[in-house]
Image (tube, helix red, strand yellow):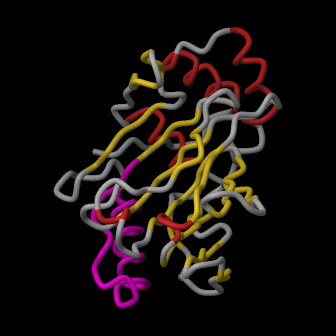
Amino acid sequence: MFHTHSRPRHATEVYEHLFDIFGYDGGMSIALQGSLLDIVGAAGDAPALRPLRGVERTSLSKGAWIDVVPGWLTGADLLFEHLAEHVPWRAERRPMYDRVVDVPRLLCFYDEDDELPHPVLAEARSALSSRYGAELGEPFRTSGLCFYRDGRDSVAWHGDRIGRGNSEDTMVAIISIGAPRDLLLRPCGGGTTQRHRLGHGDLLVMGGSCQRTWEHAVPKTAKPVGPRISIQFRPRGVR
């Protein structure tokens, strides 16, 4: 059911495959060329999870906090390749001010009863629920995926405040695979910005009041950067 390879693909094969799927233009292919070499490994290890130990918690302000676990998911390159090819990615358009604009990333959402696109994602959701369930008061249930195709794709400053996140403490757990990108955090209303460079199976969990009292963003960059997939796990009623 799940796509596997007897050998890992050479980086050039992955470039061509992604170009075919997403119709990258010449400018984008140049931007990708230097970065994909860093994320297509030769080991071919199946995606797996490390034990959730050595969690680094950083207290923010107003009851917000983040946990960071570098390299929690191993075999992230093969998972990236699988998700890039098999997830039913869609482009969206949204109203902004007086016009409708393209959302600068591809999206896919899996509700709590939907089958996830790779078994390791179900394992990750279960492991996160086991680790944080008592503190959160409920399990993680839904999964949202974002595909940042290059440095032109981004997400603006926001908090996950649709639903209960607007009024209750909650958690959002993010696994990043593919080329590292900066995830920024800042207090609502302004303040010092934190920068976390995430990729290659890194885990970041935002908890407490973080969605209400802080904002996060993945900014655009003019630097050549390869594609990244962000996998977000949330409890029921939080978007």
Residue positioned most to the top: 26
In this rendering, the answer to whether 171 lies above or below 229 is: below
Q: Position of residue 95 (x, y in %)?
A: 40, 24
Image quadrant where residue 197 sits: bottom right
**Which stretch is magenta?**
119-144
Q: Position of residue 136 (x, y in %)?
A: 37, 82
Q: Residue at x 66, y 77 (%)?
A: 60
In this rendering, the answer to whether 174 lies above or below 152 is: below
Q: Is residue 237 left or right of residue 46?
A: left
Q: Is residue 76 left or right of residue 100?
A: right
Q: Is residue 14 left or right of residue 118?
A: right
Q: Residue at x 80, y 28 (%)?
A: 222
- Give the main secondary structure, helix, strand or loop, of the magenta stretch: helix
- Where the N terminus falls, by quadrant? top left
In this rendering, the answer to whether 68 lies above or below 202 is: below
Q: Position of residue 175 (x, y in %)?
A: 53, 59
Residue positioned most to the bottom: 134
Q: Is residue 33 left or right of residue 107?
A: right
- Where the C terminus falls, by quadrant? bottom left
Name the one closer to the observer, 104 or 127.
Answer: 104
How many labels, in total?
0
Image quadrant where residue 234 sits: bottom left
Name the one closer to the observer, 187 or 216.
Answer: 187
Q: Judge whether residue 4 is colored magenta.
A: no
Q: Position of residue 180 (x, y in %)?
A: 71, 48
Name the one closer to the observer, 65 or 128.
Answer: 65
Q: Judge whether residue 140 is colored magenta.
A: yes
Name the one closer to the observer, 10 or 29.
Answer: 29
Residue positioned most to the left: 113
